[in-house]
Amino acid sequence: MEQSFDHTNNGSGNAGKPKRNNRGTSNSNTNQHHSKKSGTHPQSANKSQVKTSTAKTKGSAREAALEVLVRTEQDRSYSNLLLNQILQQYHLDKQDVGLTTEIVYGTIQRLNTIDYFLNRFVAKGLAKLEPWVRSLLRLSFYQMLYLDRVPDHAIVNEAVNLAKKKGHTGISGMVNGVLRNVIRQKETLQIPADLPAVERIALTHSHPQWMVKRWMDQIGEARTELLCEANNKPPHVSIRTNTMKLSRNELIIILNESGVDAVPSELAGDGILVKNGGNMALTPWFEAGLFSIQDESSMLVAETLQPKPGERILDCCAAPGGKTAHIAEKMGNHGEIWACDIHEHKEKLIRDQATRLGLTSVHTLVSDARDLPQHWAQESFDRILLDAPCSGLGVIRRKPEMKWNKREQDLDEVCLIQKELLNSIHPLLKVGGILIYSTCTLEYNENEGQVREFLDNHPNFEWDLPKPIEIYPYEHLSDGFFIARLRKRA
């Protein structure tokens, strides 16, 4: 299940002072977890498992945000899952939930820009500070530079009080001095306009330089700047109609009549964009199986597969099951779909989703996708979906800490896994059958480069579409995605 957070963020393209922006209250839709992927991803085993405490804690929005930021940095936890856990622990009203969400995502998104400016005010440098002090200064600076609705003096007072609560007088005095100095010099906080392009884009839109340079080499300076800017904007909240139960228009009418702002997606045929709906996974319509929560780009995978009723289909890396369910819905629940994942706890997510949606054609198997030929004979499936483990750079808006946690060498490592998966599963496809290879990354080596190498080594496969589908976040404010449709020749 892919579920979006909804907060407003400023994607200024100016190379000077960060642009201030009035922001509305966010909804509480924060427990999104976009990441699929099959457990062959080298980092998938432990990051996604954040245990939720039932103990309630009294505290402010900034205190909750501070806890999330400290633990995200120290434990390398996914911010979306950790934020949901912390929000369940704190007694916060809807407005404070929105503020907490805004501070957490905004601070992480703008991290290297914040540090660039803050370092000039901290005598020994941010790196020498205790993690909680560093995070407190960062979140306070973010509010001062990027938010308008809270006065600067209130931000300082709150930060000083938090410092007194967590530290000692010396720390609170330092925090007070740094932040008041920031206020006095705010008009001087300019990113130099004459920086080299890589450094300018990296600081203006807060991305690591290696990532900016890599994208500039692939898609050029102008598109790279658009991409980095889009990565700091909030994703839409989008849902996918369960067409087994009702049409998209019927669902839109139900939502609108209930006060939810819902409009049809222009990108995905079964998709609906939702505003002011809160956490759509907590609604009775979700429980009744009328829709699933999924990004618009992700919905295009099943559309491109074009499954037919009665077919036998393999989804190799299926968890959490959004694409599997979409395939079953498009088949009218007539046929046989095998959804596989390496992790047993993720298999349950697939089964639970199929049950909620009333899909009996979905079957599950716990297996490393590279071992699937041990379970079925060659040419067993009419269509195969390999939604491959990837670097995930198309979903930075949903997991902004990914920018800072990824290493460039990670991208090379995952390419080897993708190659192994393609080489392992292709014999399972019938002659004339369709193979979909998809990722939620923007990397050529993981996408078109990976497919071209596969085709060079397997002449019995060919492109079934003139070119692959590539979606960049700046085009539709949806996730970045790559989808290749291949056909197996006789």
Image: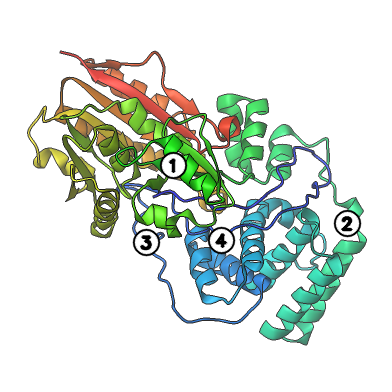
Q: Residues within 10 Å of mark 3 (few under 14, many from 20)?
A: few
- Precedes in sequence: disc 4 or disc 2: 4
For label 1, the SS is helix
Q: Residue beneath label 4, please?
A: 28
The answer to whether marks 1 and 3 mark residues whose Cβ atoms lie closer than 8 Å is: no
Above or below, 240 against 343 in this view is: above
Q: Nearer the viewer, residue 220 or 209?
A: 220
Asked if residue 48 is positioned above or below residue 52 in the image, the reply reads above
Q: Are marks 2 and 3 in contact (CB under 8 Å)?
A: no
Which of the pair 286/162 is nearer the observer? 286
Coordinates of residue 298 in the picture (x, y in percent): 42, 37
Distance (Cα) linking label 4 and label 2: 31 Å
Give the camera-side residue of 387 and 173: 387
Mark 1 or mark 2, which is nearer to you? 1
Q: Residues within 10 Å of mark 1 (few under 14, many from 20)?
A: many
Vertical placement of 116 versus 339: above or below? Answer: below
> 98 and 399: which one is in front?
98
Return the residue found at the far left. 377
Identify the disc placed on residue 46.
3
Q: Are marks 1 and 2 in contact (CB under 8 Å)?
A: no
- Nearer the camera: disc 1 or disc 3: 1
Pointer 1 or 2: first along the chain? 2
Type of amino acid at the residue the image marks with label 3: Asn
- Quick one: label 1 or label 3, which is nearer the N terminus? 3
Screen quadrant of the C terminus = top left
Q: How far is disc 1 from disc 3 in space, using C-alphas?
A: 37 Å
Label 1 amino acid?
Leu
What residue appears at the point 40 percent right and 59 percent down from the top-left corner? Answer: 48
